[in-house]
Image (cartoon, rainbow, N blue to C red):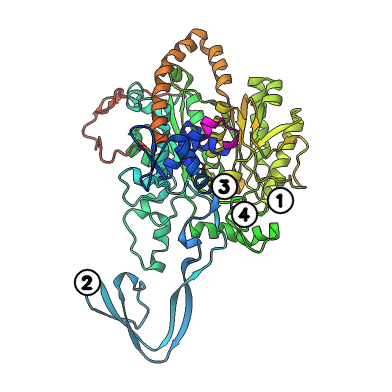
Amino acid sequence: MGGINAAGRTSGHQAYRRTILDALPQTTQIQTLTALAALMRLVTQRDDGRWETADGEVLDTAAAADRFRQPVLEHTLIRRIEDDAFAGAGIPGNRPVTMNVSEPFTFTTSRRQLPQPLPAGWETREIDAKTVEVSVPTGTLEALLPERRQASVRAAGQLPHGFSPESFYRSVHHPRGLSMAIFGASDCLGQSGLDWTALRDRLDPDAIAVYAGNSIGQLDDAGWGGMLKSYVTGSRVTSKQMPLGYGQMPADFLNAYVLGSVGATGAIQGACATFLYNLRLGVEDIRHGRRRAVMVGTSDAPVTPEIIEGFRAMSALADDQSLMALDALELLTDADYQRACRPFARNCGFTIAEASQFVLLMDDSLALETGAQILGSVPEVHVNADGWKRSISAPGIGNYITLGKSVALARSILGDESVRQRSYLHAHGTSTPKNRTTESHIFDQVARANGIENWPVAAIKAFIGHSQGSAAGDQMASALGTFAHGWIPGIPTLDAVADDVHAERLRFFQDPLAFEADASFVNAKGFGGNNATGLVLSPAVTERLLVKRHGQRAVDDWRRRREQTLAAAAAHETAADAGRFDVIYRFGEGVLDGPELEVSADAVSIPGYGRPVSLKADNPFGTLD
């Protein structure tokens, strides 16, 4: 697994550890704080292992953690948006006006700012290569006047302050979401401890797949956002904005610049369920033997004024006025913004966020053969729509089916006692009034149907916000952290469970809960009727299933091979904790146009790949005689 969100880096469970920080042993707290400080460029690790500040002061690890604890706590997770446009300066824009021009006038402007096409009667005279003089006749003039307005929403789950994914590779005007995808996939490969080239060369290239995308596309200025507002702002559309804006572009970037994969590729967009939709593609490919290794992920960067305004207009976001009304405040402080997201409590809307999350799936035989780390397993992802709806954004019935089927599968694999006593819910938990009622009712009904009395509920959007299509990826990464460390993150903003929450059979808690989990249900209750629930099994359960299928000897051999993998993963984590990131971006390397291939009736051999692509057909129809 790998990626980045408002809590930090995914590998090594860093972001997860940030959400249970106070429950960690002191040494692990110190490690987490210094690693986040390095990620945020507050300190740099020296060759002797000590830390150097921007002012040149040298500190040991404990002193560095103590010095930067407060800046790390204040500039990670949900907080006041750290962008001047959302501060006092206000968000730039234009206001349309209509004026009656009583006599002709002229003005000088740049070519780029000329309205296109020119209004009737306007004339231009070239002054130089970049500047023109414009003559405007009498009559009615419609124009756009620049203005600035105060942001209505000023809280978001932003990446840790000071972290810039594009700074770690040769990024040239890449949208933020794609830079985050490059970082996230590289982090995933590093954390795996596997040599990707060696892994690729032992497989038919068509046995590898990449399913990655996002729910919105790239709508910042380097993507479709800049392209769509170019006429209004007077800016020039670039040749990159159109292609790089597509929602499947994270998969395209991984194939072209990170993995060099020629196998299956694509992305399914499903609003908040997008990560789980793509995970389902990978799981099904592996279950049916079509692929042996699949990278799955999402990367969303929606913290822009335009996207935030769109959600605010739907009354979906926790805006400043609603937050003040909720707590009877006249002014919001930084601490109030950090409490903006309150799943299952009295709340007023969700908090938008950015995140990139990737996981590497393998079939069990390949995992054993390569000595891969096993962080968990996913036997199935269930997806169902809502059916008839009042409005496209209204809640519906599909999530009852997805969670019900996932629990039924878990009971079949684990048994009733395990599901009732050692499973927990990773709620979608958006912090909207409708979600707290409807999702808790789903949980309550499924709990009653399965005899579950006290089902623990995690809702990590309270820490990191709602990263749209990447939200379930955030939940998945947190679930894997719980398996590794034995704590379920609490809901720190849950001062009291709201009266309309169906809580009789659910267990809500503010502080981290010590819990030995066999399984976690990662839930996405999505906009538009995009519902999905993924069953995630713990490493311990997964190993027991592997013994049952492959035998104890095969698993013992895997454990011996895994030692080298764990050592490589530990080396990656040590370097990343020091702020040294090996981001993979192989632009222009190994490019093939077609004539270099060797094509036969049975296979295609590709230079640079260890094995040919088999063309053997899987014919389900038989032969016509």
| Residue 554 located left or right of residue 465 | left
Query: Residue drawn at (70%, 25%), measured in percent from left and top?
Result: 421
The residue to which callout 3 is attached is: 465
- Gap between marks 2 and 1, in whole Å? 59 Å
Task: Tell us which disc is closer to us: 3 or 4.
Answer: 4
Q: Are marks 2 and 1 in contact (CB under 8 Å)?
A: no
Q: Do the residues labelled 4 and 2 touch (CB within 8 Å)?
A: no
Query: Quadrant of the rendered structure where residue 128 is?
Result: bottom left
The residue stretch that appears in magenta: 21-29
Q: What residue type is labelled 2?
A: Ala
Task: Tell us which disc is closer to us: 4 or 2.
Answer: 4
Q: Are marks 3 and 2 in contact (CB under 8 Å)?
A: no
- Gap between marks 3 and 4, in whole Å? 14 Å
The answer to which of marks 3 and 2 sits earlier in the sequence is 2
Instruction: Assign a secondary structure to mark 3.
Output: loop
| Residue 605 located left or right of residue 411 | left
Q: Mainly helix, strand or loop, the magenta region?
A: helix
